[in-house]
Image (cartoon, rainbow, N blue to C red):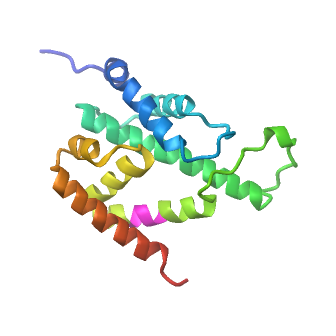
Amino acid sequence: MTEQPSQSAQAAELLPQVYDDLRQLARFKMSSNAPNQTLQPTALVHEAYLRLLSSKNSDWKNRRYFFAAAAEAMRRILIERARARHAQKRGAGEIPADIDDVDIAAPMPSEDLLALDAALDRLAAAHPEKAELVKLKFFAGLPTMEAASVLEISEPTAKRYWAFSRAWLFRELNKPI
């Protein structure tokens, strides 16, 4: 009887194979943010990797599962940072910080990122595979062809899912309050 490798052993084996890809994707994703921000692509990859290692219920059978989990981890990190910035804007009982310690805001306001996150959760409830495509493209920065490969769908299907998801999210984000 052969033993299944532990999750950390799986991650340790898979990370060297995908590290450069993850770093490139993080760099691509972060390139649209302010140049003086405190979170750098390498830090985003490392924080996502640490979260993947500490996750109790992840099973990375192959590249697809690992990239999906990494995209979700990156998404969560960016959302948590946006929430923290949003809370800081509202005071959140914090003592004012030295200007050198304050994060520079990204071009996408944190309120918009939080609204997108909520809409993406609703999309995932109705259309899980389409939401995964959005996460891979928007949060992990994968091009359509690579996202299609990770999801094991054809590129034309990925393009249809992307068009549907963009329209669906646009409608959700522009609903009157």
**Foreground pick, 66 / 53:** 66
What residue is at 39 percent from the left and 67 percent from the top? 122
Q: How many marks?
A: 0
**Foreground pick, 71 / 36:** 36
What residue is at 28 percent from the left and 59 percent from the top? 130
Horizontal side, residue 60 vs residue 15: left or right: left
Q: Position of residue 100 (x, y in %)?
A: 83, 38
What residue is at 62 percent from the left and 53 percent from the top? 82
* On-image quarter of the N terminus: top left
Instruction: Residue 109: name its quadrant.
Output: bottom right
Q: Position of residue 176 (x, y in %)?
A: 52, 84
Horizontal side, residue 50 vs residue 123: left or right: right
* Residues rendered magenta in the picture: 118-122
- Outermost residue, left side: 1
Horizontal side, residue 64 vs residue 57: left or right: left
Q: Is residue 16 above or below residue 37?
A: above
* On-image quarter of the C terminus: bottom right
What residue is at 64 percent from the left and 46 percent from the top? 34
Horizontal side, residue 157 vs residue 139: left or right: left
**Foreground pick, 152 / 50:** 152
Instruction: Residue 17: name its quadrant.
Output: top left
Q: Position of residue 16 (x, y in %)?
A: 36, 18
Q: Position of residue 85 (x, y in %)?
A: 69, 52
Our reading of the magenta stretch's main secondary structure is helix
Q: Is residue 28 above or below residue 137?
A: above
- Outermost residue, bottom side: 176
In reply to whether residue 126 is colored magenta, the answer given is no
